[in-house]
Image: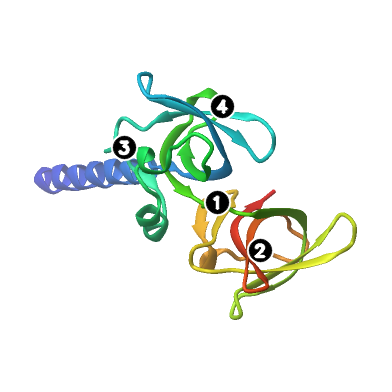
Amino acid sequence: MSRGIVKTCILAGCLFFACVAATAQEVVHALTGTVSSIDAAGKTFTVFTDNHSDGFFKDRTNSKAPIKLDRKIRNDATADDASKKQGAYVIVFYFGEGEARNAVGLRSLGPGPFTRSTGTVVKFEGKEHSLSIKDESGEIESFKITSDTVAETSTGVVDGFKFEPQKGDHVQVTAAAASGSATALFVNAL
């Protein structure tokens, strides 16, 4: 009888620690901006973000820390040094807040030109992969969502095909024009 209780306690303890380990993952978020300075010796860099503030990031030194990041986005995000060039317009993938933000990776968005639009979602077509927003002036803008689109949500970063905004949500879209239509590169759910 006591042997059964001991086994049950050991099993319960193992399950408890497995659950704690599974919930200890860092949630990865993203933002866009221009790399403004790099301190290679200090392993830090600064990004002038799209909301007009300086974002300070540390290169992630502990690559074994568990993070919650979509596999496709993880594969598309380069190692910090590959896209970290002064003046590059990038998406920064990070965890942490304030001065304690750790960069997980970067994705260069290329030379542009880019547009940024802020507004309210009026239509989202998941099957057609399109998003329409109404900006402050009342104009409706439409964007194509692709597998390369990155979306920042309250629960972290998701790829564009997993992003499901609701009518009335407030968003900011960074887009590039190609073949006469705007393609969303980054959507920030505000």
Distance from disc 3 to disc 1, alpha carbons, whole Å, reads 33 Å
Q: Residues within 10 Å of mark 2 (few under 14, many from 20)?
A: many
| Residue 65, label in figure | 3
Q: Earlier in the sequence, mark 3 or mark 4?
A: 3
Q: Nearer the viewer, mark 2 or mark 1?
A: 1
Residue indicated by mark 2 = 165
The reply to whether callout 3 and callout 4 are in contact (CB within 8 Å) is no
Identified at 51% across, 52% down, the residue is 110
Q: Earlier in the sequence, mark 2 or mark 4?
A: 4
Residue 24 image-quadrant placement: top left
Q: Secondary structure at mark 2?
A: loop
Residue indicated by mark 1 = 111
In this view of the protein, which residue sits in the foreground, 75 or 167? 75
Q: Earlier in the sequence, mark 2 or mark 1?
A: 1
Which amino acid, mark 2? Pro
Residue indicated by mark 4 = 98
User: Residue 168 at x, y = what percent?
Assistant: 78, 61
Q: Secondary structure at mark 4?
A: helix
Distance from disc 2 to disc 4, alpha carbons, whole Å, reads 26 Å
Distance from disc 3 to disc 4, alpha carbons, whole Å, reads 19 Å
Distance from disc 2 to disc 1, alpha carbons, whole Å, reads 28 Å
Q: Residue furthest right?
A: 137
Left or right: where does residue 131 sit relative to residue 108? right
Q: Earlier in the sequence, mark 4 or mark 1?
A: 4
Q: Residue furthest bottom?
A: 127
Distance from disc 4 to disc 1, alpha carbons, whole Å, reads 28 Å
